[in-house]
Amino acid sequence: MKDRIRVGIVGLKAERGWANAAHIPALRALSEDIEVVGAANIQLATCSPNFLILEGIERWDGFHAQILKTPIRWEAGYVIPPTEPGLGVELNESVIRNHPYAGHQLHLEMKGDPIE
């Protein structure tokens, strides 16, 4: 598995501050933890003056919406930040329990050959 730096929300907030001081727009890409990291990215984007774009896996619909008790909302191409406490999302543990991951690769890993 590739090395990943995980700095958390406090570290990302500092990173955004440094970028803002240098007049650099901010982009936040998702890793393999789509639902929780996506929710954190939404909250971070709403408080970053240099926020440019939020990357997501489509619209966090389908299975990704089922994992959350209240799915991420979209209107006219814009994500609507949750207003609930914390990150604004609550995991649906019964859905997660019924779909255990049995693989060994991340779903966003690069493949050696093109997928047909």
Image: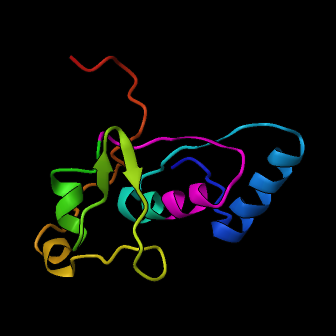
What number of labels is visible? 0
In which quarter of the view is residue 114 placed? top left
Residue depicted at x 81% and y 45%: 19
> Measured along the vertical axis of the image, is residue 44 above or below residue 115?
below
Q: Quadrant of the C terminus?
A: top left
Q: Could you tell me residue 86's position as x and y percent? A: 49, 80
Taking depth in this image into account, of 77 and 104 the one nearest to the observer is 77
Residue depicted at x 85% and y 51%: 18
Residue 98 belongs to magenta span = no
Q: Could you tell me residue 43's position as x and y percent? A: 53, 64
Taking depth in this image into account, of 80 and 57 the one nearest to the observer is 80
Side of 11 where 81 appears, left or right? left
Residue farthest toward the front in the current orientation of the protein: 76
Taking depth in this image into account, of 78 and 71 the one nearest to the observer is 78
Q: Which residues are magenta?
A: 40-58
> Measured along the vertical axis of the image, is residue 12 above or below residue 111?
below
Taking depth in this image into account, of 23 and 39 the one nearest to the observer is 23
Q: Could you tell me residue 45's position as x and y percent? A: 58, 54
Residue 52 belongs to magenta span = yes
Side of 35 where 71 appears, left or right? left
In which quarter of the view is residue 48 placed? bottom right
